[in-house]
């Protein structure tokens, strides 16, 4: 078996990044610039306390983390509802044309400026409704499969693992790695950071943990798929060394009905990334 036990991967500690957009030159630091100039006026105990507050620990999942993990995952996915409904429309040129045509036809038929102005609002409302409906179905599926029993899905199988990021004694981020022996790759899954603790380099630290795990277990590559709309998520993957391998238009999530109305108001783009570690 080429994989090491997940328990053999040691705990990683870093100092949180200063910038919210990953990929900057200053990835991780021990003491910020301001602390360096003022350290002479601080006692050793005070300096140590300040460092501990900014220290992010990445450790393996424990059963007591279960509720926090589910909460962070749930909140992160729920953010996709407005992002998919509104921001996602910018990436759907065909849908924009259809909505423009519907709005124009509304004016042609009704001859009413007021009703025509209401058409875009109704269309956006329909997008939000279907985004909420589909994403809730996806959440229900995820929370009844791997996210319902992390120990069984990630911790027990050799070549897979799940980690949490801890800051100030609180679980603030999550990520999983699921190995695939058939092609000797590991999939980065379920990465999410509590919205109150973003901009501290936690997501990058979690990604690096998966990279460390993949190298220790001699995987040839790390793969991931994402429907994220925000540019920051894609920049994060690129900053970790991932290459964009392609995109699937009108991607289907579990729980979708595939009805004509649903397809008109809900669209997803599925991006595939790969980080090649070594050739087979």
Image (cartoon, rainbow, N blue to C red):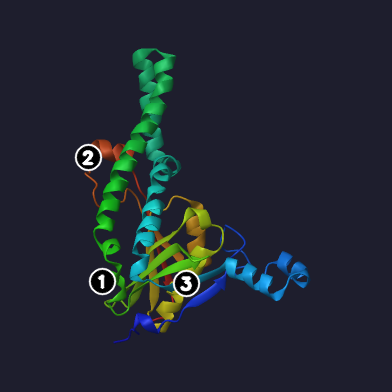
**Residue 24: x %, y % from top left:** 61, 64
Q: Are marks 1 and 3 in contact (CB under 8 Å)?
A: no
Which residue occupies the foreground of this view, 97 or 251?
Answer: 251
Task: Report how far apart the C-alphas of labels 2 and 1 lie in the structure.
Answer: 35 Å
Which residue occupies the foreground of this view, 225 or 248?
Answer: 225
Determine which residue is flagged by label 2: 259
Q: Are marks 2 and 1 in contact (CB under 8 Å)?
A: no
First in residue order: circle 2 vs circle 1: 1
Determine which residue is flagged by label 1: 152
Residue depicted at x 33% and y 75%: 160
Which residue occupies the foreground of this view, 75 or 203?
Answer: 75
* Label 1 Cα neighbours within 10 Å, binned few <14 / some 14-19 / many ≥20: few
Foreground label between 2 and 3 = 3
Q: Is residue 140 above or below residue 96?
A: below
**Residue 21: x %, y % from top left:** 57, 58
First in residue order: circle 1 vs circle 3: 3
Determine which residue is flagged by label 3: 58
Foreground label between 2 and 1 = 1
Q: How many marks on residues?
A: 3
Residue depicted at x 34% and y 42%: 131
Q: Is residue 164 above or below residue 112?
A: below
**Residue 53: x %, y % from top left:** 59, 66
Q: What is the quadrant of residue 40 in the picture? A: bottom right
Q: Secondary structure at mark 3?
A: strand
Tell me: 13 left or right of 273. right
Res 250 visible: yes
Tell me: 142 left or right of 163. left
**Residue 76: x %, y % from top left:** 41, 53
């Amino acid at each position: 078996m080429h994989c090491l036990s997940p328990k053999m991967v040691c705990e990683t500690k870093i100092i949180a990044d200063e910038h919210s957009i990953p990929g900057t030159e200053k990835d991780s630091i021990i003491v910020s610039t301001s602390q360096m100039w003022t350290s002479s006026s601080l006692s050793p105990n005070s300096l140590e306390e300040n460092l501990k507050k900014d220290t992010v620990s990445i450790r393996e999942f424990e059963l007591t983390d279960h509720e926090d993990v589910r909460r962070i995952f749930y909140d992160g996915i729920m953010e996709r509802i407005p992002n998919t409904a509104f921001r996602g429309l910018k990436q759907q040129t065909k849908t924009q044309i259809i909505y423009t045509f519907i709005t124009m036809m509304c004016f042609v038929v009704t001859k009413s400026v007021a009703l025509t102005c209401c058409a875009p609002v109704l269309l956006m409302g329909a997008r939000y409704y279907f985004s909420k409906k589909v994403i809730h179905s996806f959440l229900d599926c995820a929370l009844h499969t791997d996210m319902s029993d992390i120990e069984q899905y990630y911790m027990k199988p050799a070549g897979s693992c799940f980690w949490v990021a801890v800051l100030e004694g609180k679980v603030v981020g999550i990520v999983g790695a699921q190995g695939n022996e058939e092609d000797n790759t590991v999939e980065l899954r379920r990465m999410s950071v509590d919205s109150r603790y973003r901009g501290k380099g936690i997501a990058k630290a979690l990604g690096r943990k998966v990279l460390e795990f993949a190298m220790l277990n001699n995987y040839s590559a790390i793969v991931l798929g994402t429907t994220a709309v925000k540019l920051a998520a894609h920049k994060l993957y690129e900053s970790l060394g991932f290459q964009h391998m392609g995109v699937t238009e009108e991607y289907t999530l579990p729980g979708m009905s595939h009805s004509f109305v649903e397809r008109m108001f809900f669209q997803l783009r599925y991006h595939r990334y790969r980080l090649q570690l070594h050739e087979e």
